[in-house]
Structures are given as structure tokens and as C-alpha cells.
């Protein structure tokens, strides 16, 4: 059996602190779940809808030039109702972690 | 004053199932919820989404689950205080608690069960500098009484169901309705989208997209106009009597955080080895709002927690009384409404 592989992600939390965290790529995790796993945002303030793109509590800004999957209609619609949205805003729950995301840099959007 | 056996704060799946379990023990429940309808997140966030881990339901929509839970506990006549948020709790010398809502409704009971999920749903307020200055002076986040908008000029902002629905509804009552949204696309029921398109085509409402309300202006403290920017550039002003930003709701722990309960990671610590009681005897926390080692925020775990909480409530309400577990299949269910459900008797007859 091959060793599970981790990628490393740079996360700036809502207080401006920078964390370099590992994320397994073999657990079907999304970015919101990785942030929760490492408790980088208080429980109850992130992933409120559970990952259905039905709230914007996992909004983050992508600061690196990684090639991420396109936004779905649901994600686009939710971001159009969210606050503090920027051109590089994404919903963390809609980004499935994969090996191409090594070195991804993101910043959590403020809590609404 | 409303008197009951168990005050349940939160009418989501866990709170609704607690009504049933309490009913089996002849305990009456009254539920308080900040939302106008029961169901909690299942109604507010994802009524049309499927859930796959409710035992015996390979697939059930969240809204359907709420209906089934209401039906299951119906014969135990639960009381409801809806659209009000539980604000304060007080323990009296006689051991009874009073829970008072933000609208002053008082509830009294020997047991309180907090089944508040992630907290009470509060309107999401857009980031406009002087927004709060005009609250109740033209700005409202919830339409409580549509009549107050009769013959008034109204601006609605938002792109979801409630923005669409109120635009349609108020177009009949108000003098003029303007709907402003950041995108051209709306997320709502197809019927509503079509209806708003029709109202726009007929010139009954004004639709401004993609645009965002950026400032509010007042006159003598009362809202008089709003500024919006179109495509992030030009600022425009429209006169209005009312501004209703409808950007959905998000849950906040709210006043419960100040009740003297032990809180960890935005959840209430409970004794999971026994009965899900909090650090305040007589106050329990069940479902997503509680935490203990190994906690899982799942509806099915909330059901189990509600069941054990009711046992503990029974002991508090009936001190010294013995409890014997009865199976519903064997003893049937006697509703508080006089109804009785029971298994049909098998026929005993000889075959000759």
C-alpha cells in the first residue's frame, strides 16, 4: 500500500494569522473541511450549511494562481448574495482538494 | 404566561422529536423558535435537499422530515411560540424556570431543553455604513406587516426567494417597488423569477441589476433615499420610504451565550455520560448545540440525545417515581388529544 500523500496549504485566518497546514488528498476533503479540521476558524462560524453552497460562511480569497475548478451555478449565485466578495472569492466547500493544489494560498473572508 | 413541563428552545428536528419522546412519558412540551415556521435549518437553509442518514429513510428531503416529525408528535399537542427569540432564563426558588422571549412572552416549566442548533437565525445585514441608524425608520430586514408599505415607495435588495417573493407581494400594495440585485441572475423558484420578469416587462416594478446599494440618506431621522452603484461606477440616487435588504439569515448563538452555561467552541458543554444536562441543573442541551467528547453534529444523534434528556426530565418532574420502559408496539400511544394508536390484535381462531 502506498503512503497517503499530503499537500500543504497556506491559510490566513480572520485575525490575519498565517498557518501552513497539511491536507490529505485521499479523503475527499474540501477546503472548508480542511480549515475546520485544523480549527482555523471557530466552530459554528464556518461551514454552517454543511457544505451545500447555501451559506457563505466558508468564503475565502484565493491569493495564489492555482488552476481551480470552475464555479458552479450554485456557488456563483451564493457569492452574489454574500458580503465582502472580491474577484478572487470562492466558497471553500466547493473546492475539492487534489494534488494540483500543493502550495495553495487562501485567506478567510470576514465573518458575516 | 405559558406553563408546560418542558420548554424546548429550537423547533428543529431534535426539538420536534423531543416532543414525541416526552409525550410517551406524559410530559407536555412547548417550543420556542426565532423562525416563523418549525424545522430549523431543515426549513430555513435546505428544505429541498435530501438527507441520506435518517434511519429507515434511504432518502428524505429536509422539508419532508420536518413534516413527518410534526405529524409524529401531533397527538401530544405541542405548543409553539414562533418568530420569537428566547432572550432570558431565570430559575426560581420553587425550582421552576421562566424563559422570556424578545417579545416578552413568558414560559414557565421545571425543565428547559436547549435544542438550538447553531443558534437563532438573524437577518444578514449588508455592509452599509449608516444602515443601523435607519432601522425601524425605513429600514427593515424582515417584512412583518406588509400593510405598513401601502402606498409607499419601497426598495428591496437581494437575489433569493424572499427578495423575489416580497417584490411580487408588495408590488400590489406599495406605490412603487424597486428591486436591486448584484447580478442579473436570481436564485429562486422558477415561478417567482418568471413573475418578476412579467412585472418588470409590464413596468409595474423597476429592476436594477447588476447594482448594489451603497449609501442611505435621511430626512429628520427617517429614510428618504438610497444611493446605488451600477457596475461599480456611476452613483445614482432614488427616493424611497423604505429599504428592505433581504440577504437571508445566518445563525447566531445570541443571548443563550449569556445564560451562565459552560460554552466551548460555540456549543454548550453537557454531561454525555448520563443525560445531556448542562452545568445548570434542569437545563439540558441536545442536538447540534451541545458538545462532549466524540460529539457528532448529526440529526440522528440529536434524536438519541432528546430521548435520554426526556428520561432525566421525567425524574425531575416525578421525583421518586419508578420508571418502566414501555415499547410503543406493545403499549400503543395515548395522545393528549384523546387519540389512541395501537397494534391491531391478531385473530385467534381455530381452523377446523
Image: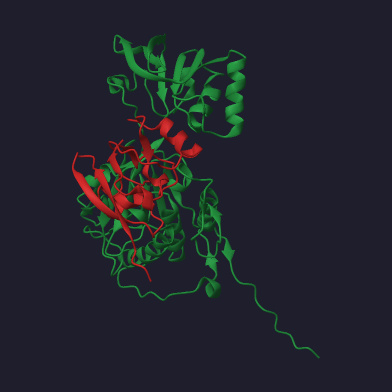
Chain colours: A red, B green
Looking at this view, name the residue that lies furthest to the right: B352
Q: Position of residue B210 (x, y in %)?
A: 46, 21
**Measuring 35% from the left and 54% from the top, which residue is drawn there?**
B288
User: Which quadrant of the structure image shows residue A58?
Assistant: top left
Q: Quadrant where the N terminus of chain A lies?
A: bottom left
Q: Looking at the picture, does residue B223 appear above or below residue B33? A: above
Left or right, B209 with respect to A93, comes to right
Q: Where is residue A63 in the image (x, y as percent from the top left)?
A: 30, 37
In this view of the protein, which residue sits in the foreground, A79 or B200? A79
Q: Position of residue B251 (x, y in %)?
A: 35, 42
Residue B178 in view, yes or no: yes
Q: Looking at the picture, does residue B133 appear above or below residue B297? A: above
In this view of the protein, which residue sits in the foreground, B61 or B147? B61
Q: Looking at the picture, does residue B307 appear above or below residue A23? A: below
User: Which quadrant of the structure image shows residue B94?
Assistant: bottom left
In this view of the protein, which residue sits in the foreground, B45 or A107? A107
Left or right, B205 with respect to A90, comes to right
Q: Quadrant where the C terminus of chain A lies?
A: top left
Q: Where is residue B350 in the image (x, y as percent from the top left)?
A: 75, 88
User: Which quadrant of the structure image shows residue B193?
Assistant: top right
Amino acid at each position: 500500500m502506498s503512503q497517503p500523500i499530503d499537500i500543504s496549504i497556506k491559510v490566513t485566518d480572520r485575525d490575519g494569522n498565517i498557518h501552513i497546514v497539511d491536507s490529505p488528498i485521499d479523503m475527499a476533503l474540501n477546503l472548508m473541511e480542511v480549515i475546520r479540521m485544523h480549527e482555523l476558524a471557530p466552530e459554528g462560524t464556518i461551514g454552517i450549511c454543511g457544505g451545500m453552497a447555501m451559506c457563505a460562511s466558508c468564503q475565502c480569497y484565493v491569493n495564489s494562481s492555482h488552476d481551480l475548478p470552475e464555479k458552479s451555478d450554485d456557488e456563483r449565485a451564493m457569492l452574489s448574495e454574500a458580503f465582502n466578495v472580491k474577484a478572487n472569492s470562492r466558497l471553500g466547500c466547493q473546492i475539492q482538494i487534489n494534488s494540483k493544489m500543493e502550495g495553495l494560498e487562501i485567506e478567510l473572508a470576514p465573518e458575516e | 404566561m405559558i406553563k408546560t413541563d418542558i420548554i424546548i428552545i429550537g423547533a428543529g428536528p431534535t426539538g420536534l422529536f423531543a416532543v414525541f419522546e416526552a409525550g410517551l412519558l406524559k410530559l407536555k412540551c412547548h417550543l420556542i423558535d426565532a423562525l416563523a415556521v418549525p424545522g430549523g435549518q431543515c426549513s430555513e437553509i435546505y428544505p429541498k435537499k435530501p438527507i441520506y442518514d435518517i434511519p429507515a429513510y434511504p432518502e428524505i428531503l429536509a422539508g419532508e422530515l420536518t413534516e413527518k416529525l410534526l405529524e409524529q408528535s401531533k397527538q401530544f399537542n405541542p405548543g409553539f411560540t414562533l418568530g420569537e427569540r428566547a432572550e432570558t432564563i431565570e430559575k426560581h426558588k420553587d425550582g421552576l424556570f421562566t424563559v422570556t422571549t424578545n417579545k416578552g412572552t413568558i414560559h414557565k416549566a421545571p425543565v428547559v431543553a436547549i435544542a438550538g442548533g447553531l443558534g437563532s437565525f438573524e437577518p444578514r445585514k449588508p455592509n452599509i455604513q449608516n444602515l443601523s441608524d435607519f432601522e425601524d425608520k425605513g429600514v427593515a430586514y424582515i417584512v412583518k406587516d406588509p400593510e405598513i408599505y401601502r402606498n409607499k415607495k419601497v426598495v428591496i435588495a437581494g437575489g433569493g426567494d424572499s427578495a423575489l417573493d416580497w417584490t411580487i407581494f408588495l408590488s400590489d400594495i406599495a406605490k412603487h417597488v424597486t428591486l436591486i440585485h448584484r447580478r442579473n441572475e436570481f436564485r429562486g423558484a422558477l415561478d417567482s423569477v418568471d413573475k418578476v420578469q412579467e412585472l418588470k416587462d409590464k413596468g409595474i416594478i423597476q429592476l436594477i441589476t447588476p447594482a448594489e446599494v451603497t449609501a442611505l440618506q435621511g430626512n429628520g431621522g427617517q429614510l428618504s433615499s438610497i444611493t446605488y452603484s451600477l457596475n461599480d461606477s456611476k452613483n445614482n440616487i432614488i427616493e424611497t420610504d423604505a429599504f428592505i435588504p433581504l440577504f437571508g439569515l445566518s445563525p447566531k448563538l445570541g443571548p443563550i451565550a449569556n445564560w451562565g452555561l459552560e460554552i466551548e467552541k460555540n456549543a454548550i458543554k453537557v454531561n454525555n455520560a448520563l443525560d445531556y444536562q448542562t452545568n445548570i441543573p434542569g437545563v439540558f442541551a441536545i442536538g447540534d448545540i451541545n458538545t462532549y467528547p466524540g460529539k457528532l453534529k448529526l440529526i440522528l444523534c440529536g434524536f438519541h440525545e432528546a430521548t435520554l434528556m426526556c428520561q432525566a426530565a421525567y425524574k425531575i418532574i416525578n421525583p421518586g417515581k419508578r420508571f418502566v420502559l414501555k415499547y410503543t408496539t406493545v403499549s400503543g400511544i395515548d395522545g393528549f388529544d384523546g387519540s389512541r394508536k395501537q397494534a391491531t390484535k391478531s385473530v385467534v381462531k381455530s381452523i377446523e
